[in-house]
Amino acid sequence: MILSLVSIYRSLPGIINIIFSISMILVAFRFWEEAAWIYRALMLLGIVVFPVLQPAAIYLRSRRIVSRMPEGLEMYIGPEGITISGPNDSNSLAYSELTAVKLVAGMIIIHTKGKQGYALSRQVLGGKAQEVYDLLRRRIPAKG
């Protein structure tokens, strides 16, 4: 959840959101006095769309995703790769399928060649974030 909120302003849409929000504030400041009430309302709406409503929408979407995750999901990091197992099935991920591992705000983000990724929170890592991060970084195949 927090990952989406943290990384949104590091992306191109996040930068555009910041520029748009600043522009709307400047437009509202410039035309507020002579604007009719309907235009004032539209300016206020334009100001809050990106810094307030969009992060709220991302937060709500993240909550829905987390609520659909199965209980009892486990991840095992072994010598051959990573195994993710749940109550009904199990998937293996070879280290050759990893493309990147990032340590962000005490969380580990694992990127794969497919359109999958895994986020391991501080609670899941139990204070061993740096150790797990270093292990996974060593296992990622060299590019080139």
Image (tube, rainbow, N blue to C red):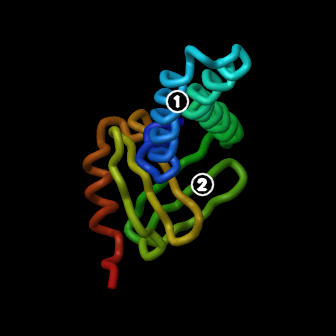
Residue where numbered disc 1 is placed: 27
Can you name the residue that lies furthest to the bottom here? 144
Q: Quadrant of residue 39?
A: top right
- Residue closest to the far front: 34
Closest to the camera, between mark 1 and mark 2, is 1
132 up-or-down from 65: above or below: below
Give me the C-alpha separation between circle 1 and circle 2. Answer: 53 Å
37 or 68: nearer the viewer: 37
Residue in the image at 41% along x and 47% along y: 10
The quarter of the rendered structure image containing the N terminus is top right
Q: Earlier in the sequence, mark 1 or mark 2?
A: 1
Q: Residue at x 43, y 76 (%)?
A: 96
* Residue visible at 65% across and 33% down in the picture: 57
Q: Position of residue 66 (x, y in %)?
A: 63, 38
Which residue in the structure is indicated by mark 2? 85
- Residue 85, image x, y percentages: 60, 54
Residue 42 drawn above or below residue 83: above
